[in-house]
Structure formats: C-alpha cells, structure tokens
Amino acid sequence: MGLKVYLSGEIHTDWRDQIIAGAEGLDVTFSSPVTDHGASDDCGVTILGAEDKKFWHDHKGAMVNAIRTRHGIENADVVVVRFGTEYKQWNAAFDAGYAAALGKSVITLNPPEHGHALKEVHAASLAVAEEPSQVVAILKYVLTGTLPT
C-alpha cells in the first residue's frame, strides 16, 4: 500500500528534505511545487511572454504554477502543507482547502504560534504537526501500523 504525498507550502527551509530523508525505505512517492523561487515567479512570462505590469507578470506565473499544483494535489493520497515563520504562504492555505475539498488527507505542518491564525486550516486537516519528524512518524504509522520508538 504505497502513498503518493504532495509537499506544499513554504520553500525557504529544508523541511521537504527532512521528510523525504526520514521516509527512506517506506513505499512513498513525493511531489511538490517548483521550489526555485525565481523560476516559480517567472514561469508565466518566460513561457507566455513578458508583461508590463507586475500584477499580470505574477498572474501568469500563478496560473501556470496552478496547473502543476492542481495536478500534484489531485494525484496525491496525502497532502502535507507547511506554513513557515518568515513568509506568508497564502497559496498554501488554498492548497490545504483544495485538497480537503477533494477528500484528500491533509497534514498541516507549522509552528505552534501559528495555531490561532490557522485554526480553519487545522479544522480541515486530519493531523497538525509542528516538526517534519512528526510527519514522517504519521507516514510510517499509516504504512506500517507501528509507532515511533
């Protein structure tokens, strides 16, 4: 019983690498949005042509990125959504809601100080983790039925 896991949200820390390394040996396939910030911001104008206004530059990028994001979420069994401390990941809140609306299992990953701000996102999640190691423990439990030692 393998799992397809989509890792959404904050792109400025190594949380994805921690989860992927911790899940080594498990039957898990990971996918994610493009985590190169420049490529993510500029994909729309690079592919579809330049824009004079920053709004339309960002809009094109958001739309092209949404194709990848929707595909990743729709094909996932579990969606992990990370909210970091430094940057506002408004798109991650959308990803969590979209995944939940599709009936996907959502795990949010955020520091405890974000608890109040994310209470609605947490309500749509099946688990709320504070550390990548907790996400790994959930995946191991789901796949093997064993608790961490």
Image: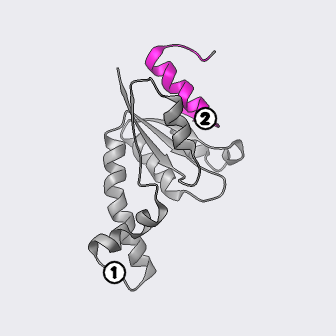
Q: Which residue has dot 2 on it?
A: 129
Residue depth check, mark 2 versus mark 1: number of the one nearer the observer: 1
Residue 126 appearing in the image: no
Position of residue 101 measured from the top left corner of the image (x, y, whole percent): 39, 42
Q: Mark 2 is on which residue type?
A: Ala
Q: Which residue has dot 1 on it?
A: 50
**Residue 143 in magenta stretch:** yes
* Tag 2 and tag 1, C-beta contact below 8 Å: no
Residue at the image point whose x is 49% and y is 35% from the top: 20
Position of residue 31 measured from the top left corner of the image (x, y, whole percent): 39, 42
Observer-nearest of 91 and 101: 91
The magenta region covers 127-148
Horizontally, is 66 left or right of 86 in the view?
left
**Secondary structure state at the residue bearing disc 2:** strand
Q: Mark 1 is on which residue type?
A: Ala
Q: Quadrant of residue 77?
A: top left
- Rounded to the nearest angstrom, the CA distance separating label 2 from label 1 is 40 Å
Horizontally, is 50 left or right of 15 in the view?
left
Image vertical order of residue 113 relative to residue 141, above or below? below
Residue pushed farthest left?
48
Q: Quadrant of residue 52?
A: bottom left
Observer-nearest of 94 and 111: 111
**Residue 146 in magenta stretch:** yes
Q: Badge 1 local density, few (<14 within 10 Å), some, or many (20+)?
A: some
Q: Looking at the image, tell me whether mark 2 or mark 1 is earlier in sequence order.
A: 1
**Secondary structure state at the residue bearing disc 1:** loop
- Location of the N terminus by quadrant is top left
Image vertical order of residue 52 relative to residue 64, above or below? below
Horizontally, is 99 left or right of 137 in the view?
left
